[in-house]
Image (cartoon, coloured by chain):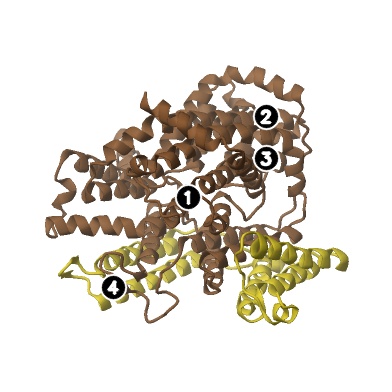
Chain colours: A brown, B yellow
Amino acid sequence: MEAIGDLMSGFAVVLSWQNFVYMVIGIVLGVIIGVLPGLGGANGVAILLPLTFSMPPTSAIILLSCIYWGALFGGAITSILFNIPGEPWSVATTFDGHPMAQKGQAGEALTAAFTSSFVGALFAVIVITLAAPLVASFALQFGPAEKFSVFFLAFCSFVGMGKEPPTKTIAAMMLGFALAAVGTDTVTGQLRLTFGSTELLSGFDFLVAVIGLFGIGEILLTMEEGLSFKGKAARINAAVVWQTWKELPRYWMTSLRSCLIGCWMGITPAGATPASFMSYGIAKRASRRGDKFGTGEIEGVVAPETAAHAAGTSALLPMLSLGVPGSPTAAVLLGGLLIWGLQPGPLLFVEQKEFVWGLIASMYLGNIVGLIVVLTMVPFFAAILRVPFGIIAPIILVICAIGAYTVHNNTFDIIMMLVFGVAGYFLKKCNYPLAPLVLAIVLGDKAEESFRQSLLISQGGLGIFFSNGLVSTIMALGLVALFWPVLSNLYGRLLTPARPT
Amino acid sequence: MSDSPDGQSSGPRQHLVEVGVAAFMVLLGIIAIIGSLRVGTGWGAEGPKSGFFPFWIGLIVVGTSLYNMVRAYTHGSRKLFASWMQIAQVLKVVLPLTIYVGVIPWIGIYLASALLIAGFMRWIGRYGWLLTLAISIGLPVVTYFTFEMWFLVPLPKGPIEDMLGL
């Protein structure tokens, strides 16, 4: 198979000592980012992105994607030891992970979590290796209408699959599109929505938005809750790891199911968070010990962790092959590609073979390195969490400010970071989803471009979006996803005959 | 900080804050519509004009936000959004951060960061002077070497750096 050969040459690219060092640094930084409140995968990558401008793109993406894997691993540590999900997708891990730690089985819980994460990620990488080149070669034939339909489907999925009220998801998403429109119109070069401000000439930068919304917003939320870390001690030794590994194959069915859920949710951009909840919920219903879930069942750790990592990893599939990222962090990575002068999308597989396969190879290696790093360094990471919030908070604020400044070397961006931070606090508290907002800021220009090009071809008729089988199918799927909340509601009413209440 | 029950159990209600957030989004939507109308929303020589896309986007923002606003008012949760004490906690970050952001162009990011960390640790964390000084001076120094020396990324500087000749 061609993919295997390409993958091998990818390994050859990655296996230089320099890239290996970046990989380890990335994983360690990523776990620290995942462990600390206010620094997550998305804004951790956003803050470090400007520092990679001078690096070769392949090394840069290895460093940044390893930060992403690290952050995915890190979330589990805080969930299990401290009952504080460091990342939204590790909320479901607290349900059984923390009770296990309270029972003195922290080592087992962590080993199960890390191993499951690894299995989920590995499954997703294999899916990417096999499917991404096919999807990309298929997508090479896409015209503007097909491109727009893919964006349409991606954004509609948020409405249908998010747990937030649909109208709030749409409002947040459209706000993102509006922010993306500010500045120079990419099609005609005309200025718009700047209202005479010179600072807005280049529009709102999504990196600044990510740092503000996810970083500052998160700090404000943590501050409001008044944090007091009460952690459980963790000791992982070879015996515990070995014992847990002997036990884990018993849950192969849960693992496989969680991998599939995760990949599905990651490719359609619903993301890691709903994937972990869904997987936990289904495992609870399917398991013979389902009634014991919540009291410290190892299966209750396996299910959400596997799904979260499968989703987090497979989110890169549409980013690489279609140019549509499946998660906020994938969106930031996509922004990085644009900055390094690479055009994300199907052509990447043709024109930048070395880069793409280097990245995919680094996913395999990065996750193996990640598993070893987290298993051996847990006490170190747990110690970081014990640093009081009064010290950590101002340091994170300073790091966010520096990150926002370095995007364009502009102090105005630090002001925007603060504005986005306060906005993020209110939006989060009022149950507006932030992921579609960020994705809309990143993809706004491209979605608009494909939309306007389509209309130009059809001379203004919307019929072009239903002009052939392919584009009609994707648009129809999008419409189903968009109206899913209404449809499922109707379906539910049809099934249960009206009862007098 | 007082422990009076007032501070803990009273505060703005969730539904009113949601109405406020939705109203603000309506305002942003209207701004997008006005801006789009200025550059033209119709069909031009090169297809749809620049304002075409943001115009419709703005309309959807206004439409959904109006719905959210009414919905929040009629069906929204009457629970507390946050107690006044929690809001005070949040303001303890927002206010220093606002001052920090405001003074960076004048005194540079290094001095401003040192002051922010020192202030935060001293008055909110209530740490001793020694630890406070160590971290508030240490972090900017580490930052200086990492960014200016290693990555060659210049950060905003002020009169202090000029005096030191950095």
Label 4 vs label 3: CA separation?
49 Å
Indicate which disc, 4 or 1, sits on the residue closer to the N terminus.
4
Same chain for the residues under marks 4 and 1 in the image: yes
Q: Is residue A209 visible?
A: yes
Same chain for the residues under marks 3 and 2 in the image: yes
Q: What amino acid is at disc 4?
A: Gln
Indicate which disc, 1 or 3, sits on the residue closer to the N terminus.
3
Q: Which residue is mark 1?
A: A333
Specify the label residue A77 is tagged with: 3
Label 4 vs label 2: CA separation?
55 Å
Q: Residue A90 location in percent, x, y?
A: 59, 41
Q: Residue A28 location in percent, x, y?
A: 66, 44
2 or 1: mark nearer the eye:
1
**Element type at mark 1:** helix
Q: Residue A415 location in percent, x, y?
A: 55, 73
Label 1 vs label 3: CA separation?
24 Å
